[in-house]
Structures are given as structure tokens and as C-alpha cells.
């Protein structure tokens, strides 16, 4: 089958366009963004310790998802992201427009959450949330997988639920990170969730919401990395509070770190470099 040109970025695509016809599953424009996030330097088993950077600001999604977050706290988050050159901020949907305005021209991406934190929304609701977030200025979507369907082995339901969000996001050239909430899953389910996310066209798989019974572990990151291979991202999120933990996740194969302690992590990294 011949490759088609991506209607979003006008680059040649390596595969046929996904069902919506808007953007290829492996789109050259999106692939560059994933490469920029570090995925291309990986093997399926992670990275060598020598390859872990001391200044890891470009790995960090500076995160504030607590329910009582205020506009003033979001403004501070955005300023910290600008000052430290973080990869992105990750905020709840009502704050997307504010972040997009405050971060315009900075190179910091605006990520928001969909189906959060349970993953128990209908697909139509998740798609609506995605489309509204993109209108408001989001450039990355962190969605929660349909966990109940996964556990019931309704793989096609999981795949199509994820694909709905992926298609909506890719129409606007936004990235999608699929949260599998690994602490609720067996290893077999983690592998299946990661595989289904990749099959649905996700750009990243992500360990946790930060609101579940556990956060990121190096074991889970390594398992997810081995499952999805080197060409899509893995985001470690939940409980990453210092440089040592962040480096452990990167060694295991993470290309993004979701953390509310991003400033502390960067300060520790720069201290190590002196």
C-alpha cells in the first residue's frame, strides 16, 4: 500500500491514514516531535546510565492537577515552566486557555487530561473533551484508558475508545499520551494496555494518573518500553519527587516525566553538574 501525505502537516507519511483520513498513524511531523522528546535514542529496553542527562528539564511535564488549584497557582506553574524550559505543563481542562496565553512563544507545550482520573467516561465524552481542549489551546492530551473494559478483556472497546481520542487530537496535530493506571493492573494487563494504545495510534503510553493506588515504578516503565518499542514515548508519572527517581525512570525507558516537583528535580540536576 502506498503512503499518503498527512493533511495536517503536509509531510509524507509512512503508513496509511487512520480511519478519519486526517493524519497518518506514523506521521512525519508527529514523529519529529516524539524524536525531539527523546524516544529515538532508546532501545526497547531503555537507555544506558551514561546517556541519562544531568539537566533533564526537557523531559518534564510540570504538573498541577489537584482539584483546588487556583488561577494564581497556574500562573506560577507557567512561569516556572518558562524559566526552566520544561517540555510541557499539565493542567486540568479549565486552565488550558490561561496556559496557552501565558506560554505563547515559549516552546513549552500545553497538556491537559481527558477522561480523568477514572477513564470511565464514554468515548463520545472523551472526544468532546479532547476537541474542546484543542480549541482552547492544548497541544498534548493525556487520556485515561477504559480500565474496566481492559480488565474484562474487551480489547476492541479499549482500542476504539483510545482511537477516538487519538483521531480527534491528530486532526489538530496534537500528541496523545494514554494513561494505563499501572498500579491497578497485572503485568499481563500492562502489556496488553500498552499494545492496544500503540495499535490505536497513541504517541505515548503513561504509567499513572497520580490519583490511583500507586505511581510510576521502574519495573512498569521498562515493561511498557519493551512492549511499545523505541518509536513512541513512555511517560512516568506519579510519585517522581527527586532527581534520583527521575533518572531511574529515564534509565528504564521514560522519555517524559510527569511531576509536580519539576523545579526541585532541575535544581538537583544542576547542582550535580557543578
Image (spheres, rainbow, N blue to C red):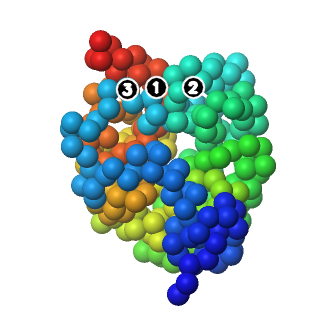
Q: Mark 3 points at which residue?
A: 55
Left or right? Give the position of 66 relative to 261.
right
Tell me if label 1 and label 2 are in contact, CB under 8 Å.
Answer: yes
Against 191, residue 75 (above or below) is above
The disc placed on residue 44 is none
Percent of width and height locating residue 252: 27, 46
Q: Let me know if residue 158 appears in the view.
A: no
Nearest the viewer among 252 and 105 is 105
Viewer-side label of 2, 3: 3
- Residue name at image x 32 percent, y 40 percent: 250
- Residue name at image x 73 percent, y 50 percent: 134
- Residue name at image x 40 percent, y 68 percent: 195
- Residue name at image x 53 percent, y 50 percent: 33
Q: Single out the residue that lies furthest toward the left.
A: 49
Q: Let me know if residue 258 appears in the view.
A: yes
Against 150, residue 79 (above or below) is above
Q: Mark 1 points at which residue?
A: 262
Label 3 element class: loop
Q: In which quarter of the image is the C terminus?
A: top left
Against 39, residue 6 (above or below) is below
Label 2 element class: helix
Pointer 1 or 2: first along the chain: 2
Pointer 2 or 3: first along the chain: 3
Percent of width and height locating residue 136: 77, 44
Tell me if label 2 and label 3 are in contact, CB under 8 Å.
Answer: no
Q: Separation of disc 3 and disc 1 at Cα?
A: 11 Å
Q: Mark 2 points at which residue?
A: 81
Amino acid at each position: 500500500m502506498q503512503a499518503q501525505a498527512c493533511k495536517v502537516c503536509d509531510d509524507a507519511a509512512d503508513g496509511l491514514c487512520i480511519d478519519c483520513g486526517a493524519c497518518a498513524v506514523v506521521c512525519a511531523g508527529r514523529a519529529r516531535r516524539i524524536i525531539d522528546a527523546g524516544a529515538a535514542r532508546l532501545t526497547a529496553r531503555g537507555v544506558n546510565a551514561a546517556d541519562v542527562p544531568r539537566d533533564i528539564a526537557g523531559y518534564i511535564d510540570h504538573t498541577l492537577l489537584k482539584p483546588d488549584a487556583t488561577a494564581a497557582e497556574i500562573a506560577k506553574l507557567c512561569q516556572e515552566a518558562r524559566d526552566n524550559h520544561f517540555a510541557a505543563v499539565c493542567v486540568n481542562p479549565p486552565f488550558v486557555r490561561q496556559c496557552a496565553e501565558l506560554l505563547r512563544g515559549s516552546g513549552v507545550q500545553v497538556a491537559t487530561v481527558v477522561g480523568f482520573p477514572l477513564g470511565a467516561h464514554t468515548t463520545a465524552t472523551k472526544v468532546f473533551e479532547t476537541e474542546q481542549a484543542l480549541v482552547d489551546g492544548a497541544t498534548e492530551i493525556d487520556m485515561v484508558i477504559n480500565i474496566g473494559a481492559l480488565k474484562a478483556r474487551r480489547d476492541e472497546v479499549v482500542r476504539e475508545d483510545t482511537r477516538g481520542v487519538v483521531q480527534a487530537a491528530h486532526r489538530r496535530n496534537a500528541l496523545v499520551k494514554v494513561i494505563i493506571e499501572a498500579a491497578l493492573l497485572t503485568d499481563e494487563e500492562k502489556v496488553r494496555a500498552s499494545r492496544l494504545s500503540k495499535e490505536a495510534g497513541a504517541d505515548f503510553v503513561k504509567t499513572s494518573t497520580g490519583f490511583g493506588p500507586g505511581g510510576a515504578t521502574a519495573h512498569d516503565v521498562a515493561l511498557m518500553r519493551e512492549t511499545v518499542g523505541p518509536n513512541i514515548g513512555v511517560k512516568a508519572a506519579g510519585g517522581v519527587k527527586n532527581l534520583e527517581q527521575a533518572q531511574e525512570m529515564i534509565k528504564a525507558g521514560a522519555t517524559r516525566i510527569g511531576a509536580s516537583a519539576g523545579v526541585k528535580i532541575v535544581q538537583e540536576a544542576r547542582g550535580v553538574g557543578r
